[in-house]
Image: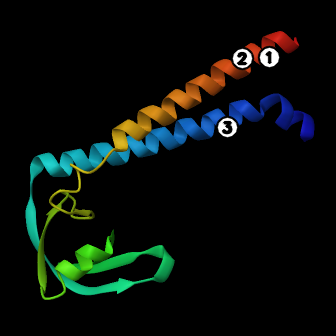
Amino acid sequence: MINFLRNNGLKIGAIIMLLISIIVFRKGFVQKEIFEKNKQVTVIITDCQNNGRRGHFLKLNYKGKKYVKRIKKSFCDEIKDQNTLKMLVSDSENELNFLNEYRNNNAFFLAIIFLSIAIAIIFKSSIWRIKLA
């Protein structure tokens, strides 16, 4: 087991980084698509709560489905008197985004960084493998 990890540990790490970059890229693409379609809906605010160190969470209700979004404390203070909120919804109506959420998103940048790190690890492990052989 130790020899397996010693010989293949970097490749396994690179594969994990590659999978993470694909997941992050897909999430960014979905948010971009939601933003471009601009399908605005009105959702009902059910609760805005503080979970200590974990931050603030906004509980929403849209067409009988419950959604939970992580927010900043200041946003909770801004909407404390409101019962509804305008948001963007995906075509399948399974994901809600704030109106400005995509503008503040750096998912594509993070995906490129993770992908670059994965490629560098694969390249480095191949060089080390050649030197050890």
Question: Percent from the top left, x then y, of residue 100?
Answer: 17, 56
Mark 3: which amino acid?
Gly
Residue identifier under label 2: 126
- Badge count: 3
| Rendered image quadrant of residue 65 | bottom left
Q: Is residue 70 above or below residue 11?
A: below
| Rendered image quadrant of residue 57 | bottom left
Please give the name of the residue rendered at 83% of the width and 11% of the height, measured from the top-left corner.
131
Q: Distance between the Cα atoms at labels 1 and 2?
A: 5 Å
Please give the name of the residue rendered at 61% of the width and 41% of the height, measured from the top-left corner.
16
Residue identifier under label 1: 129
Q: Which numbered disc flags the more N-terminal residue, 1 or 3?
A: 3
Q: Residues within 10 Å of mark 1 (few under 14, many from 20)?
A: few
Q: In this view of the protein, which residue sits in the foreground, 72 or 38?
A: 72
Q: Distance between the Cα atoms at labels 1 and 3?
A: 15 Å
Numbered disc 1: secondary structure: helix
Q: Is residue 109 left or right of residue 22?
A: left
Question: Percent from the top left, x then y, of residue 119?
Answer: 57, 24
